[in-house]
Image (spheres, helix red, strand yellow):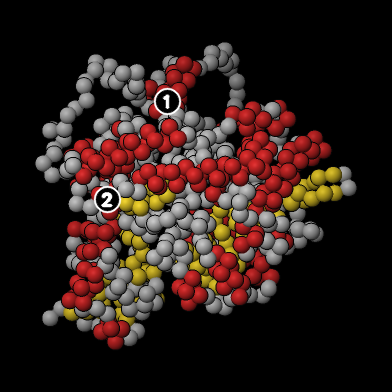
Amino acid sequence: MSDWSRAVSASAKESAPPGTTSATRKAPEATTSGHRGLVLEEELLFEQGSPDLSGVDLPPVEAFADRLGSLERKAPIGLPGLSEPQVVRHFTRLSQKNYAIDCGLYPLGSCTMKYNPRANERVARLDGFAEIHPLQPAATIKGALQVIEDLAHWLEVLTGMPAIALSPGAGAHGELCGMMTIKAALESRGEERRRVLVAASAHGTNPASAATCGYEIEAVPSNEKGRLDLEELERRLGADVAALMLTNPNTCGLFEDEICEIAEALHRAGAFFYCDGANFNALLGRVRPGDLGIDCMHLNLHKTFSTPHGGGGPGSGPVALSAALAPFAPLPWLVHGEKGLCLREGRSPPAAQSIGRIKGFHGQFGTFVRALAYLMSLGADGLKGAAEDAVLNANYLRTRLEGTLSLSFPGMSMHEVLFDDRFLEGTGVSTLAFAKAMIDEGFHPMTVYFPLVVKGAMLIEPTETESKASLDAFVASLEALAQKARAGEAAFFHEAPRLAPRRRFDEVAAARHPVLRWRPKAAAENGG
Amino acid sequence: MTQRRFSAEHEWVRRDGEIYVVGITDYAQAQLGDVVYVELPLKGRRVEKGKEAATVESVKAASEVYAPLSGEIIETNEALSADPAKVNADPEGEGWVFKLRPDDPQEFEALMDEAAYKRFIEEKP
């Protein structure tokens, strides 16, 4: 998805604090099998495989003459031989080790890990949606086209923007698509603008998307309130600036309160305003980005509109476009023709200025169905309620925790709340170690070390999914951990996680000497 | 006498005749944490004062190394590709990043000297 926000830090010093050697660490109680409780340890499928095993029985092959000639395979293909139950058990065990929103609170800031209602899944599994193929005749998929049309309509109403490009496959792809339309619009005006300004608090994908389009990137710093510094922006604006990329609410969980002035400044300079819609969950039904002067904004269906993500399903990053950018939207276009809805797949009017196709077929259709089911089941009032509850939950956590953790910017937050590591000063405990200790407490850690505008960031996004009881339990654990840190129990944190199936990983060694490919033991030992 | 100057973006520059050696300061490496990758500029590339010249990546984040002087890159520290940990172990020695030939040696004089840089990092919030 579009986040680099899950990056965490480790230091070798932390994983082996002074005075602690691996020998003095308490080894987990050994078992004969190597399993612990009902958490089973097993080898990789490739290591379990045996050539005499197979999931199917095939009749012996009679003699035949092949026409492969020299192309005939000489060596075994190297796939493991496995029985069906072996495979099913392996993947079931893996899924049990996976922490998911269906297991509990998942407070990863900026990721909007909200519950995925089962009603969406029910609708997505209807034969008319699940069993269709993108290459079947258009006349046989009228219902699917209507879903795309209806979803686009909902998104247009929510954003207050006249056009939606649905094909981008995820947030960063949406950013790329948006920046490509901006570039195309500028080129059609005969302008060659070389620079894109990006807020210092931006998701890392923002500068990456603009750079992929060939732009030079310049960061715009935040002010002391954690918002984009308008004066610093104006100082950087000029005839060679193509666009500003800004997230609202920003990654500090704050509403950009000068956003209208920012839009005006950009438009005065002839530049476009790109808004990263990753945090749209805070604004649903309350604020229409089109009213703020935004020209282009991607939405993350997998965040705001409750479709599974983070390994659970494909993303989808539709882009809302202003009237100035709409003619450049990617193909295909859904248009109303004589025979009802149809797809325009070539660069012919009205799509003559389109940037062209950016994804195979029509986008993540299964995700569209889920998002539309979510929109229709909540309705306009329900969506507004979801945004309000998301903001309420974040502010509840802020008021409960601001005396314990260190709040980075005072005052109301939006859908997520940002703390930093000042409360750990002098304790010898880092943000990373604190996050690892949360795993032992049964909580998935928040986003750490992002955004980069504060030191040792802890970004918490509870979403509207969580009940007060769930948030209270989370607060109780954080309070207890903070107290432990202040009581001088740094060693406890350096040891964490103690109760997870795996202990602390050596992230530094993994990054410096990555092992990217599994090899059979014999080959690996021979250095092969 | 070795002459060293410092930028507000935490690069150090050492004059070595007509050539200037650039790296990141001890303060910068401590803030970054363990460096896992260094992206070096191409030899012969022109760099502009205050603009990105290299990237230093730690497990926390990727940070730009800005050119403290405008000029031409004439050598890079290839040893960092195999052993980026040198940036942590000896940031102001073996962990140097690139050497450049400046357009205007006067730019060097305008940078902070050691005492000024020391005050600069102490005043940081």
Q: Position of residue A337 (x, y in %)?
A: 85, 49
Question: What residue does disc 1 label?
Answer: A96
Residue appearing at x 18%, y 62% in the figure = B90
The chain to which mark 1 is attached is A
Nearer to us: label 2 or label 1: 2
Q: Decide which of tag 2 and tag 1 comes sooner along the chain.
A: 1
Q: Quadrant of residue A181?
A: bottom right
Report the amino acid beneath label 1. Answer: Gln
Q: CA distance from mark 2 to mark 1?
A: 35 Å
In the picture, measured across the screen, residue B88 lies left or right of residue A218, that is left
The chain to which mark 2 is attached is A
In the picture, measured across the screen, residue A86 lies left or right of residue A524, that is right
Report the amino acid beneath label 2. Answer: Phe
Question: What residue does disc 2 label?
Answer: A423
- Element under label 2? helix
Residue appearing at x 28%, y 83% in the figure = B110
Foreground pick, A219 / A376: A376
Q: Position of residue B34 (x, y in %)?
A: 26, 53
Within 10 Å of disc 2 (Cα), the crowding (few <14, some 14-19, many 20+) is: some
